[in-house]
Image: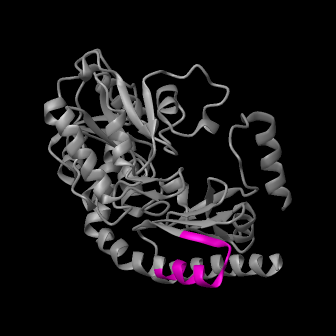
Amino acid sequence: MGQATEDVIKQYDAYVMNTYVRSPLVITKAKGSRVWDVEGREYLDLFPGWGVSGLGYNHPWVMAALRGQAGRVVHVSNNYYHPLQWRAAKRLVEASFDGTVFFSNSGAEAVETAIKLARRWGEGRHEIIVMEQSFHGRTMAALSATGQSKHQEGFEPLLPGFVRVPFNDLAAVQAAVTPRTCAVLVEPIQGEGGVRVADDGFLTGLRRLCDERRLLLILDEIQTGMGRTGTWFAYQHSGAEPDLLLTAKMLGGGFPIGAVVAKRALAGVLGPGTHATTYGGSPLGCACILAAFEAVEKQRLLERVNALSPVLFARLRALKERVPAIREVRGRGFMAGVELGASGRPIVEACRAKRLLINCTQETVLRLLPALTITRAQLDRGLAMLEEALVEAAAQAT
């Protein structure tokens, strides 16, 4: 590491709470799918901002909206109105289903909102069925809903009222429903759970079950929304329309903002004084949402995902035939997981040495979330670097 990198890390150690596993990389500039470190080295990022920069870093339309709105008004209290909030809400509804929107600052806040709404709607029914290996956030209710005990250790007692069942197991969900159940919460693709895709039949079965038992179906699309899987939202592949849709990550094109879309019949459940967030739905955030929607639509990014996704998965599955360490390739659209038979951390580090940035989750699953704006040449180059790292690791292991 150069001296500048060492200096920044030293200052982090002195002043920043150590709650993240960080790579020794100091990023000072970014554009599209490329980032530069403090020493001026260029990297290709196939996991930009944990999916937040799904339009690529510093998308020009989002940046123009950000700069323009910052020169007018940044924040307006939700005790008043501003025209961008209803426009952003309308755009979300047009891309999903008829309903109303609550704006938050993050995905975890969106989850908290949904849990409160479901419990209030349940009028005494308070239990929510959640999935094993799910991940819904780090705040207390979202953490309690998460189906991974490793994230919960040391934070007990957790919020009660969450019943865990195996993912993709409709019979298990049916068996878990009791007179206390008010909702089912599920990710169409478990991201932190290892890029595990819900079967379309599982989601449609949940929709039928919720209709039959008068339960709310809540879909956590914080990572899969805004075109990540080739449709605006992942549930649209199956047609299993939820009662509550949660989104964040890509929603603001890089700006931190989240949202809950609730079916219109639920619009009055959370009335004035029952829920709020100071910064939610700010003019700045809503301007970025509108710019992000415009970019996906006018630059035909859904079509780009659907054209390049087969290339991505064909390359990864061909690699699986060459590298015995790869056990399975999973995913949909621009969300891919490569499960290894051993720790994926050395592969992530080897890729970084080659100037490629990827992620590892569940210890053994390499995770790729390319920006929707990535070029075919960049995707090919990134996959070639990943292949080199995996082939070299396999050779060293023999």
Q: Position of residue 72 (x, y in %)?
A: 33, 40
**In this view of the protein, can residue 281 be seen by the observer?**
no
Quarter the N terminus occupies: bottom right
Would residue 307 be found to the left or right of residue 262 on screen? right
Q: Position of residue 247 (x, y in %)?
A: 36, 45
Residue at 50 percent across and 61 percent down: it is 57
Residue at 29 percent across and 20 percent down: it is 125
Residue interval drawn in magenta: 314-328
Main SS of the magenta part reads helix
Indicate whether residue 219 is drawn in magenta. Answer: no
Q: Position of residue 233 (x, y in %)?
A: 30, 55
Residue sitting nearer the eye, 311 or 34: 311
Q: Position of residue 120 (x, y in %)?
A: 28, 20
Would residue 265 be found to the left or right of residue 364 on screen? left
Q: Is residue 171 above or below residue 302?
A: above
Q: Is residue 184 above or below residue 221?
A: above
Residue at 39 percent across and 55 percent down: it is 224
Quarter the C terminus occupies: bottom right
Residue at 79 percent across and 48 percent down: it is 9
**In this view of the protein, can residue 266 be seen by the observer?**
yes
Q: Is residue 54 above or below residue 262?
A: below
